[in-house]
Amino acid sequence: MTELNIPAAHVRVLGHISDTNRHVLTPGVLRFLAYLHIQFEPRRRALLEDRKLQQVAIDNGKLPGFLKETKYIRESEWRVAPIPSDLLDRRVEITGPVDRKMVINALNSGAKCYMADFEDSTSPTWINLLNGQKNLIDATRRQISYTHPQTKKHYQLNEKIATLLVRPRGWHLDEAHVLVNNQVMSGSLFDFGLYFYHNAHVLLCNGSGPYFYLPKLEHHLEAKLWNDVFIASQSYLNIPQGSIRATVLIETILAVFQMEEILFELKEHSSGLNCGRWDYIFSYIKKFRKLPEFIMPERSQISMTTPFMAAYVELLVETCHKRGAHAMGGMAAQIPVRNDPELNDKMMKSVREDKQREVEAGHDGTWVAHPALVPIAMEVFNNHFTSPNQISIIPRRQHAITANELLAVPTGTITERGVNENIDVTLVYVEAWIRGMGCIPLHNKMEDAATAEISRAQIWQWAKHGCKTDNGTLVSHDLIRTHVEDCVRRRIMNGVAGNKWKLAGEIVQRLLTGDELVDFLTLPCYPHIVTFGSAL
């Protein structure tokens, strides 16, 4: 255990710090983390309480809409700050976790940008977080390399690499291994603070800057909190205001009604908005969970052409371009299919069609999860525009997109196969997450927390409202328990040593059959990966 006395603060690091990671948690960075905690933790907690009040209102039938009190922002003339040169062209971005090999491969992938993800694709074990920060420290200094222990294959950075962006955890997540004045620290401030403190000056000297993605925002005041964190942090390190740039993921049904306000709050630090489409579907289910008129069909039937999703995309692109910001498209989660050329061709065709739809909708860039998809997405965007982006093109509709369009309930069915797949995806992801894996290959896609969240929220919603499959089977708690037990039994039979199937099954049963829908599946999982003072 490491303890550090700071004026007006007492910091305790409860996780073990190895010699190789000691430079990640220096006295200087701990003072900075304590400063951020003291300045901003009360506001974070207050905003999280506001989320609970908003949910109660929705449960009682008060649907979200555009805010009357911020109408002046939507109707006034303003633009975000000019775009830094190395962020002008973002036509293909690759995303993924922060393990050492991934960082190197992503930066070398040929994508314009790489989003190093401490959120949905990283299980926040103490060792994952510290190693991830170490990897980014080495990457920004071009000192990162890796040799595979079995194959002995060596990895190092190419001369030309992608622009680095970092996604810290959302406001709702804690970092249990660090206490400031006996309070658990925010996971958001921990991830942001470590990366910013160690790398901001180096990045600026290299002609880049500290660039971020901000996840899971539900209100423009949560964006204002981030903006105030940025202002204070730049002042603390004596770097120019506006050096930080942040892209906000619009991945909650509440944030879609406040996109202009979110850009406005961050306008001196904004790099645009992103269609976090899988989390957006999850948020739709979660927020309207107790309203029977908002039953969602199985996720395979929800596409980007589904009316409420298409409206979301149109509004995001129009909003961003009107304000001079990037409108970033969603994730292509497909991965190459080995030993099945026909299936692989089918998967790659779907990627191409998805990216074609995005670029024609006006997006300035898009996401992929695997390096093999970079050339496909790049070709689609290159064929559509030759300038760095298409921000100057502002889509025009005959009428403004309405709240009803954004809330329109999709039609479809529930099948037994859909029920089984949702339960299986939830179980497999939870088991991997509590073993320290934040993203996993499953069904020829790279699944992360977002798709698992949709899967488990749908099962809970269907059981809550007594839904039936298309062949008349009731989605009951007994049915769910039977499916979970069967899945656990099958997985254990083929499980490797050290698997967590039994524990995962217990967690998943509670998630799917509890009286209340847990806000995030990682919350009940997190205590199982906290390791106070354990050896690395």
Image (cartoon, rainbow, N blue to C red):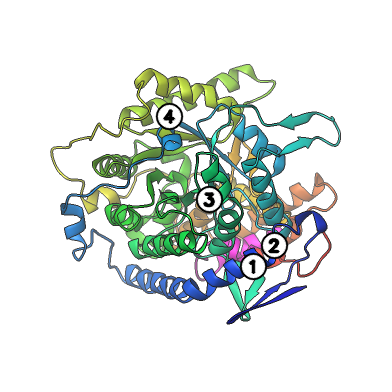
The residue segment tinted magenta is 504-525
Residue ID for mark 2: 25
Disc 1 to disc 4, C-alpha distance: 44 Å
Give the mark nearest the N terminus, 3 or 2: 2
Q: Nearer the viewer, residue 8 or 509?
A: 8
Residue behind mark 1: 30
| Vertical relation: 318 (above or below) 261 | above
Q: Is residue 483 magenta?
A: no
SS for tag 4? helix
Which residue is located at x 38 percent, y 60 percent?
Answer: 223
Q: Which residue is mark 3?
A: 167
97 or 489, which lies in front? 97
Image marks 2 and 1: residues in contact by CB distance under 8 Å? yes
Give the x, y percent position of residue 469: 47, 48
Q: Residue at x 59, y 43 (%)?
A: 447
Give the amino acid type for the residue marked by disc 3 in the picture.
Answer: Arg
What predominant SS class does the magenta segment belong to?
A: helix
Q: Earlier in the sequence, mark 3 or mark 1?
A: 1
Q: Can you give x and y, in whole percent of width and height, for residue 320 in the image?
A: 30, 43
Mark 2 vs mark 1: which is more N-terminal? Answer: 2
* Residue bearing the label numbered 4: 354
Q: Residues within 10 Å of mark 1 (few under 14, many from 20)?
A: many
Quadrant in the picture for residue 155: top right
Distance from the alpha carbon under mark 2 to that under mark 4:
42 Å
Q: Secondary structure beneath disc 2?
A: loop
Instruction: Measure the C-alpha gap from mark 3 to mark 1.
Output: 20 Å
Residue 520 colored magenta?
Answer: yes
Q: Amino acid at mark 1?
A: Leu
